[in-house]
Amino acid sequence: MEKKPTDDTRLDAPDGFVGTKEASQILGVSISTVQKMADAGMLRIWRTGGGHRRIAVDSIQAAASGMGNLETLPGHLRPMAPAGIPRKRPGGMIRVLIVEDNLVAARAMIKVLNSRSARLEILEARDAASALLKCAEFDPDLVITDLVMEPFDGFHLIRVLRSSERLADTAVLVVTGLSDDEIRARGGLGEDVLVYRKPLANERLAGFIDAFVRFHR
């Protein structure tokens, strides 16, 4: 009797694609996290005739790079390190990445930022995994992030940024509903990370942005 393919096999998979189990092993995350990343469009998938998912290796490489997990890739899968985007931008533009899974809160912050300076170029991400991909691609000057998100949280985002040679000096502003005790219980944040509590008053965010733009030359 012919063996029925499962989602963990590579039967019927074209070149350049692997099963979700292999993808999870490469990225060092659970299979359910791989499935969430695929559903969010962060991993490119192909489906077998039986409907099973296969994950594109090039999208796994991009995800590993953004997550700071290139060391988990087998040697033959590791891409060349990107040259990066220089921080000195034309016209003195400042690139800000807002990482917030609440769309209403994200839109409110964007409205405040847009009202403060024409020098701000604003990017968005809904979780830390997609934020890391954007950091790897766009090299932001400032990251404004929540802490409680799925599948990767803001603590993971900040740890990866601080461990990256290229992104370690990225300014980080945390906007969270967690208390100091809850933050410490989850491993804490560095002294260089400024923390504002939710709900965040527009005037306080505006004051922070005004100061950041003034001293960022």
Image (cartoon, rainbow, N blue to C red):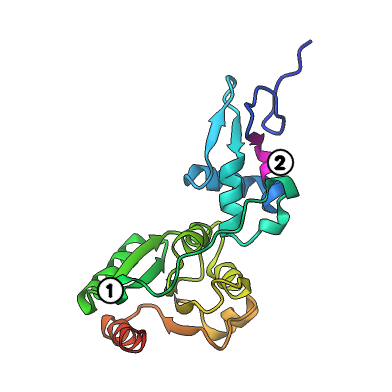
Of the 4 image quadrants, the one containing the N terminus is: top right
| Start-end of magenta stretch | 17-23
The residue depicted at 64 percent of the width and 26 percent of the height is 13
Extreme-right residue of the structure: 1
Q: Which residue is mark 2?
A: 22
Residue 183 seen? yes
Which image quadrant is residue 50 in? top right
Give SS at disc 1.
Answer: helix
Q: Residues within 10 Å of mark 2 (few under 14, many from 20)?
A: some
In this picture, residue 196 sits left or right of residue 193: left
In this picture, residue 102 sits left or right of residue 12: left
The residue depicted at 54 percent of the width and 44 percent of the height is 43
Of the 4 image quadrants, the one containing the C terminus is: bottom left
Give SS at disc 2.
Answer: helix
In whole angstroms, how far apart are the C-alphas of marks 1 and 2? 45 Å
Q: What is the three-letter code of the residue carrying label 2?
A: Glu
Q: Is residue 138 above or below residue 162?
A: above
In this picture, residue 109 sits left or right of residue 84: left
Instruction: Give the camera-side residue of 162 and 88.
Output: 88
Q: Residues within 10 Å of mark 1 (few under 14, many from 20)?
A: few
Instruction: Give the camera-side residue of 32 and 96.
Output: 96
Precedes in sequence: disc 1 or disc 2: 2
Q: Which residue is mark 1?
A: 91
Whole-percent x, y for residue 201 in the image: 30, 82
Whole-percent x, y for residue 168 in the image: 56, 76
